[in-house]
Image (cartoon, helix red, strand yellow):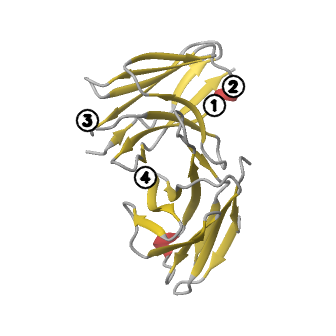
Amino acid sequence: DAGITQSPRHKVTETGTPVTLRCHQTENHRYMYWYRQDPGHGLRLIHYSYGVKDTDKGEVSDGYSVSRSKTEDFLLTLESATSSQTSVYFCAIRSTGLNYGYTFGSGTRLTVV
Amino acid sequence: QKEVEQNSGPLSVPEGAIASLNCTYSDRGSQSFFWYRQYSGKSPELIMFIYSNGDKEDGRFTAQLNKASQYVSLLIRDSQPSDSATYLCAVTRGATNKLIFGTGTLLAVQP
């Protein structure tokens, strides 16, 4: 799917546990993003990366951290999962050139119980 | 005020009609504008982008941009039931061109 995969696709976890979601791309894009999507809020940016070890916060970064040790992998960690972090998480990569729209992964549905 | 606003709908149109989806944005510095389609349970997919004032056509889709009014629209001609989905408007923000999304408009095309 356009060279971007997310894992796992579904996860149920308990409150207070750490959780890591993985985004893997095969297209060597510099920019990668993590969004969450919730009813009534749409897609909201959590964190993004503009290169290996270069990351920055988005609009809803509290409770999340990210790491990018290789161009192809961007990890999102929920340090201590809460029920408010139950959501669908999408990773995206940004194309280069005139059309730099994002391409999204298939998403991870996370449920915190 | 949200940075990108869309009517949540649902917008219901009969098959073969023109569907008109609208979006307003608050940041006058936004340079690029995108329309995504999202089917239920799926990820968003890019269908149109526009940078300049005026119209841009691609098949049955036309994007319209009016930067003075901070308004972007998407027209879908000859609407089909397969066009039934949520349409997300997105605009760029800041030097790194982060994409900020509206909450989407649900379109329902009635056979």
Chain to which mark 2 belongs? B
The residue carrying mark 3 is B28
Packing grade of label 3 (10 A; few <14, some 14-19, many >=20) is few
Q: Residue at x 35, y 45 (%)?
A: B93
Q: Are marks 3 and 2 in contact (CB under 8 Å)?
A: no
**Where residue B59 sits: x, y (%)?**
63, 16
Packing grade of label 4 (10 A; few <14, some 14-19, many >=20) is few
Q: Nearer the viewer, residue B30 or A82?
A: B30
Q: Are marks 1 and 4 in contact (CB under 8 Å)?
A: no
At label 4, the amino acid type is His
Quarter assignment of residue B30 = top left
Packing grade of label 1 (10 A; few <14, some 14-19, many >=20) is many
Q: CA distance from mark 3 to mark 2?
A: 35 Å
Secondary structure state at the residue bearing disc 2: helix
Q: CA distance from mark 2 to mark 4?
A: 26 Å
**Where residue B44 sits: x, y (%)?**
60, 44
Q: CA distance from mark 1 to mark 2?
A: 6 Å
At label 2, the amino acid type is Pro
**Where residue A91 sits: x, y (%)?**
58, 58
Q: CA distance from mark 1 to mark 4?
A: 20 Å
Secondary structure state at the residue bearing disc 4: loop
Q: Residue furthest bottom?
A: A16
* Mark linked to residue B84: 1
Q: Nearer the viewer, residue B36 or A41?
A: B36
At label 3, the amino acid type is Arg
* Mark linked to residue A41: 4
Quarter assignment of residue B71 = top left
* Mark linked to residue B81: 2
Chain to which mark 1 belongs? B
Q: Nearer the viewer, mark 4 or mark 3?
A: 3
